[in-house]
């Protein structure tokens, strides 16, 4: 799969001296959904803003579909759509006017049929004549997306697309993102909702203090860094771990009513069978058992914490 | 044709221009009523009330003499405020992100915003000339030169307004230059008098006021007489135009108050 976006040695130091990005290298594959995770102030928005031409890089270069974003800014930018984090709209414009404006601004000739398609897809068609100030926050968010899609971009940046939107709209957005991906659009999203990345992304990048500390396929990441746990709810509570269970990563929980076994998903032998046989030999009975695996959120928190 | 396939993003320029003109048309009544009413008041006070007691200036009745100055007065203030507001507003509201991320060059952005501001000013100029005709009979000796002065002044002061719009970070700053510098210069630039009427040293000082050259050149196109040579007037507008253009190019290249 070829790369549609290539970020090489990208650095950004603001006039205040704050180093927002440190030598970032990242390739985005054509047609993928890439989630960029990171705590507040990690450099996510700076990275997106540089690629889109809003912030000037201090060093490095970016190629969008093979076009340098500075030297060939026209070719690069017409391929990119941006939905910024904040709701930035012209309050007194109508929905139709503002979306048509965006298409023209990006160098595309008027195409009412396409604008209609975008507005219908985003459930904005009935609101097309309304002024933006009369719309709800969720509808304004949809308008921002319609504006970003108005010029048929190949790469779509969604900066915190579902921050502060209700569940229904979030589901709609996820469905839209999938449809866009099916149409061949590459999507790069930043999000605070790690569940969103877990649900949507093909690959995950973690950025922390301006450094890209990890880029991995989501499935591989969860297999590599994820932990699985087996919780056994005991018939009789235990005060302490009995002898004979050394060698197993066990701990007592729920005031001795539960025994938690942690195992690595990456290994072929989980050791569950041996553990259960050993418990039987020791006469430790259990009422029920439940297995769980760590979420991307836990992986992310552990990753960032280990860097602090 | 897409933006990358051409060297000029005509769709982008058109989008900005239309957007700005639509903003003007949304408030058409106040946009038109305000200059028409204020010009009418000037004619009632200076033209009819005071002008009736004044003699001719350079062979031109006072009522007609003030017409070019009044047009220039409105042209300067409207060009500056329209262009300044046009670029300040998206900067202030944050919607500038879209223009900055679009495949439009500095020149195209300037043509869109400044072109719209200058168009509005020129239209207002014609409107004021039409309003003046209701009060005072007058003729235009050099109509093409009149048009050239009108357009050149509208463009150069719209460029100046654009610079102010980029420079200003607050509403107060946005208004301070037009209010504290441009309006006094316009009033002292010979709108209501010929600088020949000023006593000695003040005549010399007045020549440092760039607006004098604009009004003088514009007045020449009406009546064929001017305080300073028409070539000098044109050269001054040209210098101002080039200065403004250079400043804007520098602002966009350096990202001054536009890009972080």
Image (cartoon, coloured by chain):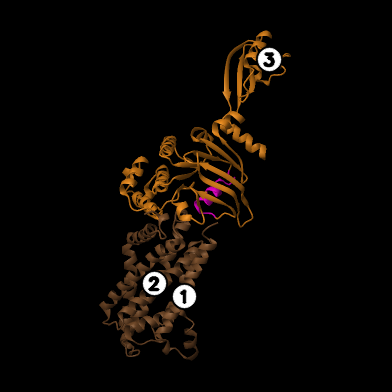
Chain colours: A orange, B brown
Is A51 covered by the magenta stretch?
Answer: yes
Q: Chain of mark 2?
A: B
For the question of whether residue B189 can be seen, the reply is no
Instruction: Answer above or below: position of B6 versus A116.
Output: below
Mark number, residue B240: 1
How far is mark 2 from mark 3, CA to CA? 88 Å
Q: Chain of mark 1?
A: B
Q: Are marks 2 and 3 in contact (CB under 8 Å)?
A: no
Choose mark 1 or mark 3, whichever is in front. Answer: 1
Q: Position of residue A192 (x, y in %)?
A: 53, 39
For disc 3, the marked residue is A238
Q: Position of residue B206 (x, y in %)?
A: 47, 84
For disc 2, the marked residue is B154
**Where is the C terminus of chain B found, in terms of image quarters?**
bottom right
Residue nearest the observer in this picture, B83 or B104: B104
For the question of whether residue B183 can be seen, the reply is yes
Q: Does residue A97 appear left or right of residue B243 in this picture?
A: left
Q: Position of residue B61 (x, y in %)?
A: 31, 87
* Quadrant of the image occupied by residue B229: bottom left
State the SS at label 3. loop
The boundaries of the magenta stretch are: A40-55
Instruction: Have a look at marks 2 and 1 and say if they share a chain.
Output: yes
How far is mark 2 from mark 1, CA to CA? 12 Å
Q: Position of residue B27 (x, y in %)?
A: 34, 61
State the SS at label 2. helix
* Label 1 Cα neighbours within 10 Å, binned few <14 / some 14-19 / many ≥20: some
How far is mark 1 from mark 3, CA to CA? 89 Å
Instruction: Have a look at marks 1 and 3 and say if they share a chain.
Output: no
State the SS at label 1. helix
Q: Are marks 2 and 1 in contact (CB under 8 Å)?
A: no
């Amino acid at each position: 799969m070829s790369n549609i976006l290539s970020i090489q040695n990208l650095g950004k130091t603001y006039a205040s001296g704050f180093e927002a990005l440190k030598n970032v290298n990242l390739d985005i594959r054509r047609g993928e959904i890439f989630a960029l995770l990171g705590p507040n102030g990690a450099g996510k928005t700076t990275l997106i803003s540089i690629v889109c031409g809003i912030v000037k890089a201090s060093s490095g270069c970016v190629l969008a579909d093979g076009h340098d974003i500075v030297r060939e800014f026209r070719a690069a930018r017409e391929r990119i759509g941006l939905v910024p984090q904040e709701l930035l709209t012209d309050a007194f414009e109508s929905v139709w006017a503002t979306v048509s404006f965006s298409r023209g601004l990006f160098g595309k000739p008027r195409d009412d049929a396409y604008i209609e398609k975008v507005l219908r897809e985003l459930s904005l068609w009935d609101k097309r004549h309304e002024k933006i100030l009369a719309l709800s926050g969720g509808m304004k968010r949809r308008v921002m997306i319609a504006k970003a899609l108005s010029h048929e971009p190949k790469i779509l940046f969604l900066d915190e697309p579902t921050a502060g939107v209700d569940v229904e709209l979030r589901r709609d957005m996820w469905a839209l993102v999938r449809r866009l991906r099916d149409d061949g659009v590459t999507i790069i999203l930043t999000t605070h909702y790690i569940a969103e990345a877990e649900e949507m992304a093909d690959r995950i990048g973690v950025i922390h203090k301006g450094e890209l500390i990890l880029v991995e396929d989501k499935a591989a990441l969860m297999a590599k860094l994820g932990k699985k746990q087996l919780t056994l709810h005991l018939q009789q509570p235990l005060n302490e771990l009995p002898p004979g269970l050394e060698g197993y990563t066990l701990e007592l929980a729920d005031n001795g009513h539960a025994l938690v076994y942690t195992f690595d998903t990456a290994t072929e032998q989980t050791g569950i069978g041996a553990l259960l046989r050993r418990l039987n030999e020791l006469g430790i009975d259990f009422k029920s058992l439940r297995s769980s695996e760590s979420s991307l959120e836990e992986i992310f928190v552990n990753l960032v914490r280990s860097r602090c | 044709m897409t933006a990358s396939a051409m060297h000029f993003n005509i769709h982008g320029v058109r989008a900005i221009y239309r957007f700005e003109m639509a903003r003007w048309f949304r408030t058409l009544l106040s946009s038109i009523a305000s200059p028409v009413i204020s010009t009418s008041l000037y004619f009632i006070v200076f033209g009819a009330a005071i002008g009736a007691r004044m003699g001719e200036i350079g062979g031109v009745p006072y009522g007609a003499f003030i017409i070019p100055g009044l047009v220039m007065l409105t042209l300067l203030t409207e060009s500056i405020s329209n262009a300044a507001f046009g670029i300040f507003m998206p900067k202030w509201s944050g919607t500038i992100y879209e223009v900055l991320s679009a495949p439009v060059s500095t020149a195209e952005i300037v043509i869109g915003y400044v072109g719209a501001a200058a168009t509005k000013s020129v239209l207002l100029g014609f409107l004021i000339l039409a309003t003046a005709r209701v009060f005072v009979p007058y003729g235009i000796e050099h109509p093409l030169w009149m048009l050239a002065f009108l357009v050149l002044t509208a463009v150069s002061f719209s460029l100046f307004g654009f610079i102010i719009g980029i420079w200003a970070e607050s509403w107060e700053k946005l208004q301070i230059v037009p209010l504290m510098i441009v309006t006094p210069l316009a009033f002292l630039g010979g709108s209501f008098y010929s600088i020949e009427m000023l006593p000695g040293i003040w005549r010399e000082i007045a020549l440092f006021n760039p607006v004098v050259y604009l009004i003088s050149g514009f007045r020449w196109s009406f009546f064929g007489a001017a305080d300073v040579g028409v070539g000098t007037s044109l050269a001054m507008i040209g210098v101002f135009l080039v200065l403004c253009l250079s400043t804007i190019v520098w602002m966009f290249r350096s990202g001054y108050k536009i890009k972080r």
